[in-house]
Image (cartoon, rainbow, N blue to C red):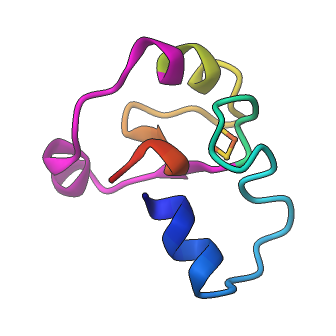
């Protein structure tokens, strides 16, 4: 997942991926460009629920740990 990429690269984003991909936070919220967003896999119900809590939600928002 995108979260793993961030972790593996040791990219230091403050608080990013706090729940380590267990869909219990929204700190991995990402906003994609429209064309990229369209190519991502489907959003699951659990992701949608958590995404609702994300700060600054947009039409092309995803949770990074759920994007593969
Ligand atoms: Fe917590 Fe993605 S890391 S929901």
Q: Nearer the viewer, residue 28 or 61?
A: 28
- Name the residue at 14% across, 49% down: 39
Tell me where residue 42 appears, x and y as whole percent. 24, 29
* Image position of 43 with respect to 55: above or below: above
Q: Is residue 18 left or right of residue 33?
A: right
Q: Nearer the viewer, residue 20 or 48?
A: 20
* Image position of 48 with respect to 61: above or below: above
Answer whether residue 38 is magenta in the image: yes
Answer whether residue 49 is magenta in the image: no
* Image position of 35 with respect to 46: above or below: below
Q: Is residue 30 left or right of residue 40?
A: right
Q: Which residues lie in the magenta part?
A: 28-47
Q: Is residue 10 left or right of residue 34?
A: right
- Name the residue at 33% across, 26% down: 43
Tell me where residue 17 appears, x and y as whole percent. 72, 54
Quick one: quadrant of the N terminus?
A: bottom left
């Amino acid at each position: 997942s995108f979260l793993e990429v961030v972790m593996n690269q040791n990219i230091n984003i403050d608080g990013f991926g706090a729940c380590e991909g267990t869909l219990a936070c929204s700190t991995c919220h990402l906003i994609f460009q429209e064309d990229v967003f369209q190519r991502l896999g489907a959003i699951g119900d659990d992701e949608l629920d958590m995404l609702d809590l994300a700060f600054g939600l947009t039409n092309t928002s995803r949770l990074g740990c759920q994007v593969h």
